[in-house]
Image: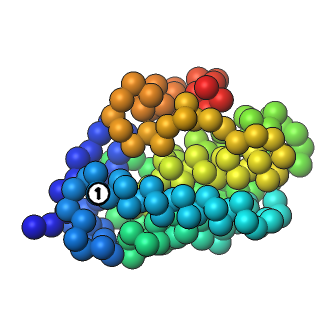
Amino acid sequence: MGLKLEYHDGQTPLDEDEKEGLIVKSITTQGELDELEQLNIEKAVIWTISKKFRKEEILSESFVRQLHKKMYGDVWNWAGQFRTTGKNIGVDWFVIGIELKCLLDDTLYWIENETYPPDEIAIRFKHRLVSIHCFPNGNGRHSRLMADIIIETIFEQPVFSWHHSNMVKPDETRRKYISAVKLADVGKIEPLLEFARG
């Protein structure tokens, strides 16, 4: 029968090869997939809480990849691997590593030089990470969890509320989130900052 996916505004379609990476072949609907991914993500959150990471560990390519693998490794066999295909958003796949390195270096600089307040550093990181679009799928949820880890572990401040939503359902909260991300794309970071704490 195969996996039937429904895409909403701001979601990245998977190509057929990427769909083949589904580990649990009995999953056929978007609802079943969302549920399985959410269970895996909850395990990843527990993993992040159970360990103590240093700033330099968090702001590394290996951690970015490892977190994605922890979030989706029970669902997709490509979890934690950079995409090798072009998408409707994101940088060209062959410059992902370079763009990520620039972001990680910039973020270390922002932290060490207090370039922005803590919330803004975490949200600027999140926005640039999702703009790079490192992985075939799960980039929004991955970038939000990265922002939570940065704000909680590096700055010792409460995680973001993200309007108490995982933004999977195409509802008003998701529309506000996508709108805020699009404004950040043109340099207006404030709506995304406000959304994150809303």
**Viewer-closest of 10 and 156:** 156
Q: Is residue 188 visible?
A: no
Q: Amino acid at mark 1?
A: Glu
**For the point 48% across and 31% down, which residue is it?**
177
Q: Split into 4 quadrants, where in the image is the C terminus?
A: top right
Q: Residue 43: x, y in percent?
A: 56, 64
**For the point 47% across and 72% down, which residue is it?**
73
**Viewer-closest of 29 and 99:** 29
Q: Split into 4 quadrants, where in the image is the N terminus?
A: bottom left
Local crowd at mark 1 within 10 Å, few (<14), some, or many (≥20)? few
Q: Residue 38: x, y in percent?
A: 45, 55
Q: Secondary structure at mark 1?
A: helix
Q: Which residue is mark 1?
A: 32
Task: Tell whether 159 sits left or right of 4.
Answer: right
Q: Is residue 13 visible?
A: yes
Q: Most extreme residue toward the right, as rendered?
A: 113
Quadrant location of residue 196?
top right
